[in-house]
Image (cartoon, rainbow, N blue to C red):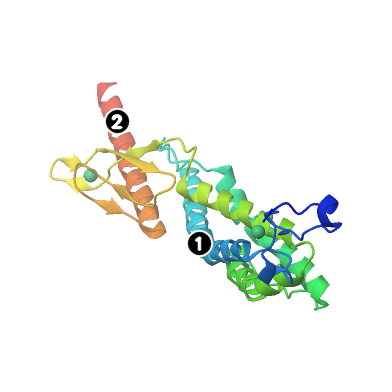
Amino acid sequence: MSHDHTPDDDGYNWPVCAACGRDLWTEELDRKSCRPCEDRAAGRLAELPQLFARLNTTAALMRGARRSGGGGTGSKTPPIPPRLEVLSLVGPGGVAARLQVIEDSWRSVLGWTVAPWRGSPAQAVPQLVKFLADNLLWACSSYEEVGQDVEELRLLHAEMKRAADGEHRPGRVKIGLCPVPRETGPCGTQLTARADSHRVHCSGCDSRWETLGEWRELRAAQEQVAEEAARQAAEQAEVAA
Ligand SMILES: [Zn+2]
Ligand SMILES: [Zn+2]
């Protein structure tokens, strides 16, 4: 039996999936998009909240590092390099706005009122994802334009995953010397961080910093050590003079 459904054969265009373009199966003929496309979109939606939370924490570390780096203490400690793709995905025009566009179009086709304001992107994303997951079956069954939304979800998920996994990241960056006090003074081991990881480990004294709060403490301790070193250098210069 030929799988060749062309208008020339039987004067009829066999329906194709609005998302992937393959011929729909006979039992899918009442749908706009095939079941595998729906399943893939559902799987991506399920992963979005956690991906977003991860990117949001990374962005907070980038902003936190940048803020405390501008303290004017003379510390030359480089911050976690801010990565624009991360900051823009968690920002006001990022993931939340792009999911909102999809929700708005589904609501308008369904004849529902516009979605309520749902707060910051971090507050809104889980609710947007829930709306889309709850109505995905409807969209894949009945929504003519579902193909472009399924594709947008695929792209968004891929962008977030790439940003979270830190592809194209510039490897490890030096973030200053370990400030932990030892018998003879600060440990002084060079610390490094990766933009995709929130964990810093000192190979010299085995100290660890993982949370945003601990990062701030690390920053403050480094700046104290740097100030103390600057004060001692100034004293020595005075003595020499
Ligand atoms: Zn499909
Ligand atoms: Zn150390």
> Residue 68 in the image: x percent, y percent?
47, 48
> Residue 7 in the image: x percent, y percent?
84, 53
Identify the element where label 2 is drawn.
helix
Q: Residue 233 has which mark?
A: 2
Picture layout, residue 28 above or below residue 176: below
Picture layout, residue 222 above or below residue 15: above
Callout 2 touching callout 1 (CB < 8 Å): no
Is 25 or 185 nearer to us in this picture?
25
| Crowd class of label 1 (few under 14; some 14 to 19; many from 20; radius 10 Å) | some
Residue 63 seen in the figure: no
Question: In this image, 198 relative to 203: left or right?
Answer: right
Question: In this image, 180 relative to 219: left or right?
Answer: left
Identify the element where label 1 is drawn.
helix
| Crowd class of label 2 (few under 14; some 14 to 19; many from 20; radius 10 Å) | few
Q: Quadrant of the C terminus?
A: top left
Is 143 or 192 nearer to us in this picture?
143
- Outermost residue, bottom direction? 112
